[in-house]
């Protein structure tokens, strides 16, 4: 995705902003996967099996 930076503030580092946002998205994806795995493990090991 291209961003038109011609009318932006001259002190804004758009490349760094984009890199930070991509890192945030990657971290969010990893956190979601870890939380889903944690929930599955909790279900498997903490919920008693029906008799």
Image (cartoon, rainbow, N blue to C red):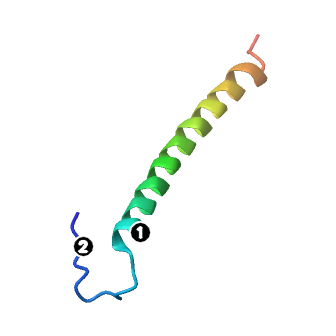
Q: What element carries label 2?
A: loop
Which residue was labeled with disc 2? Answer: 3
Residue farthest along the front direction in this orientation: 11
Determine the residue positioned at 21% across, 68% down.
2
Location of residue 21 by image quarter: bottom left
Is 9 on the left-hand or right-hand side of 31?
A: left
Q: How far apart are marks 1 and 2 (CA)?
A: 11 Å
The label on residue 28 is: none
Name the residue nearer the viewer: 5 or 37: 5
Determine the residue positioned at 46% across, 54% down.
23
Residue 50 screen position, x and y as percent: 74, 15
Name the residue nearer the viewer: 51 or 6: 6
Which residue was labeled with disc 1? Answer: 17
Determine the residue positioned at 24% across, 73% down.
3
Is 21 on the left-hand or right-hand side of 43?
A: left
Determine the residue positioned at 57% across, 44% down.
31
Residue 40 screen position, x and y as percent: 62, 28
Q: Which of marks 1 and 2 is nearer the N terminus?
A: 2
Q: Is mark 1 on a helix, strand or loop?
A: helix
Residue 15 screen position, x and y as percent: 34, 67
Name the residue nearer the viewer: 43 or 50: 43
Residue 14 screen position, x and y as percent: 35, 73
Is 50 on the left-hand or right-hand side of 37?
A: right
Does 48 appear above or below 17?
above
- Circle 2 crowding by C-alpha within 10 Å: few under 14, some 14–19, many from 20: few
Name the residue nearer the viewer: 43 or 33: 33
Quadrant that contains the N terminus = bottom left
Discs 1, 2 touching: Cβ within 8 Å: no
């Amino acid at each position: 995705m291209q961003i038109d930076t011609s009318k932006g503030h001259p002190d804004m580092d758009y490349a760094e902003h984009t890199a930070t946002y991509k890192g945030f998205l990657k971290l969010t994806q990893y956190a979601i996967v870890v939380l889903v795995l944690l929930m599955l493990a909790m279900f498997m090991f903490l919920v008693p099996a029906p008799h």
